Image: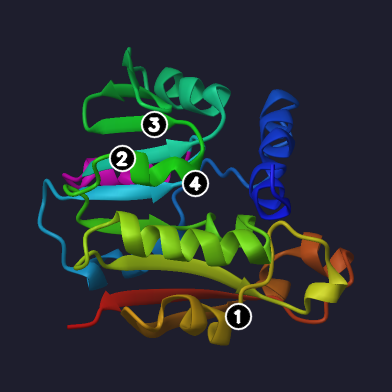
Amino acid sequence: MQPKDRLLSEPNEHWLQRWRDRNIGWHHEEFNPHLLNHWTVLELPEDSLVFAPLCGKSRDMVWLAQRGYRVRGIELSPLAVESFFAESGLQPQHESVGEFERWSAGPYELYCGDIFELERLDNEAVDAVYDRASLVALNPLQRSHYARLLRRALPAGCPMLLVAMDYPQHEMTGPPFSVDQPEVQRLYGADYQVDLLHSLDLLQESERYREQGLSRLIEQVYHLKPLG
């Protein structure tokens, strides 16, 4: 295995262990307020297929389904996928699709496997992307690879709602990692118009981050609109 490949794959065991240990502090039972406040900017009709990378067992998928959307997620941990369907009261069907195990029920299809195998799936039906916690979960090399992967694997006209964090990286060990506006522009600016929709000062909202000694922590919401 080449050094680059190791940097892309080594974090997988870390995330799998965190799900086994139920060390999932990033998971929230409530719907994400940025989704509620800004989703309509994408102007998607009902029955559109929304792609949720690194979806975990996010309740945001339920919110999207309640508004008439179909949801396709990719998640590494089978425990997360199993928990999502169990907590939703659904009995999913299972089938192998290449490198992935596909779990599906109702408006949901969750692919259990490695996000970096995304190109092995047929993604032509995807209409939009909701990235709440994927980009910030990845180290710098992974982020560059991930952004290129989305641009290659998804339809060219696929818009995105992206949530990221901006803080002095040396003050906290990620994940979540700091991804500031210039980096978002660097990663996606060649193919998207990058519009900053909202900034939230999380130090005013969360005592947990203040206790970690951060001097700044801004959560930012972006609309990525395809060029052309």
Residue 111's label in the rendered image is: 3
Disc 1 to disc 3, C-alpha distance = 29 Å
Circles 4 and 2 in contact, beta carbons < 8 Å: no
- Magenta stretch holds residue 19: no
Which residue is rendered at x = 48% and y = 20% of the image? 82
Disc 2 to disc 1, C-alpha distance = 27 Å
Which residue is rendered at x = 26% and y = 58% of the image? 128
Q: What kind of residue is marked 4?
A: Phe
Disc 1 to disc 4, C-alpha distance = 23 Å
Where is mark 1, residue-wise?
A: 180
Residue 72's label in the rendered image is: 2
- Please tell me which of labels 2 and 3 falls first in the chain: 2
Neighbourhood count class around disc 2 (C-alpha, 10 Å): few under 14, some 14–19, many 20 upward:
many
The image quarter containing residue 179 is: bottom right
Task: Examine the rendering and report whether any part of residue 81 can be seen.
Answer: yes
In front of the other: 118 or 1? 1
Circles 2 and 3 in contact, beta carbons < 8 Å: yes
Q: What kind of residue is marked 1?
A: Asp
